[in-house]
């Protein structure tokens, strides 16, 4: 089990509360983008709404403005990664794939540095001293 999976909503309980410090990339009144606390890729940024929204599928019509803001931030981060690295991937998880029950978007580039269980891959262990 991945350590982060013990939290139903890591983003509200830890990040937005300030209990777990993060390195912010960009912030608006409604959205926060920050470097993943346990990155799975060489460059791995998370974008979340500051209001609790369970998932992309549960966004209500009253929350559309928040979703638009989140997606504008995702677009801005993706544009920067494309400019800096030439490409990136954008994803969100839904249902059983969503270990943190708070809508979040991954914007990432580069080689994978962790396996599906969250363990550092062998070639990255030496580089990170793990």
Image (tube, rainbow, N blue to C red):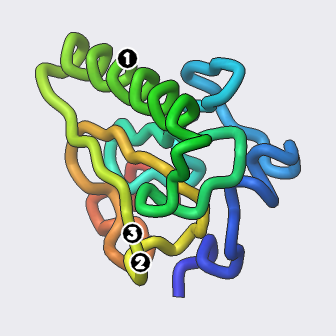
Of callouts 1 and 3, the N-terminal one: 1
- Compared to 41, does 31 lie above or below? above
Q: What percent of the width, then of the height, locates residue 96? A: 41, 83
Residue appearing at x 32%, y 56% in the figure: 113
Tag shown at residue 95: 2
- Compared to 103, does 51 lie above or below? above
Q: What percent of the width, then of the height, locates residue 119? A: 43, 73
Q: Are marks 3 and 2 in contact (CB under 8 Å)?
A: yes
Residue appearing at x 68%, y 75% in the figure: 8
Tag shown at residue 91: none
Q: Splitting the image into 4 quarters, where does residue 122 fall?
A: bottom left
Q: Splitting the image into 4 quarters, where does residue 68 fall?
A: top left
Of callouts 2 and 1, the N-terminal one: 1
Q: What percent of the width, then of the height, locates residue 60? A: 54, 51
Q: Nearer the viewer, residue 106 or 71?
A: 71
Tag shown at residue 76: 1
Specify whether 17 is left or right of 60: right
Point out the residue furthest to the front here: 61
Q: Circle 2 — which element?
A: helix
Task: Name the residue tied to disc 3.
Answer: 94
How far apart are labels 3 and 2 at the CA level? 4 Å
- Closest to the camera, between mark 2 and mark 1, is 2
Q: Splitting the image into 4 quarters, where does residue 42 fall?
A: top left
How far apart are labels 2 and 1 at the CA level? 26 Å
Residue appearing at x 29%, y 25% in the figure: 78
């Amino acid at each position: 089990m991945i350590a982060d999976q013990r939290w139903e909503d890591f983003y509200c309980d830890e990040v937005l509360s300030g209990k777990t410090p993060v390195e912010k990339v960009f912030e608006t009144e409604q959205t926060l983008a920050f470097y993943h606390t346990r990155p799975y890729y060489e460059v791995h940024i998370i974008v979340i709404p500051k209001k609790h929204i369970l998932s992309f599928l549960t966004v209500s019509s009253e929350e559309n403005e928040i979703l638009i803001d989140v997606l504008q931030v995702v677009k801005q981060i993706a544009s920067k990664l494309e400019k800096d690295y030439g490409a990136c991937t954008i994803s969100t998880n839904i249902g059983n794939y969503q270990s943190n029950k708070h809508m979040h978007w991954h914007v990432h580039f580069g080689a994978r540095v962790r396996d599906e269980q969250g363990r550092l891959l062998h070639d990255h262990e030496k580089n990170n001293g793990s």
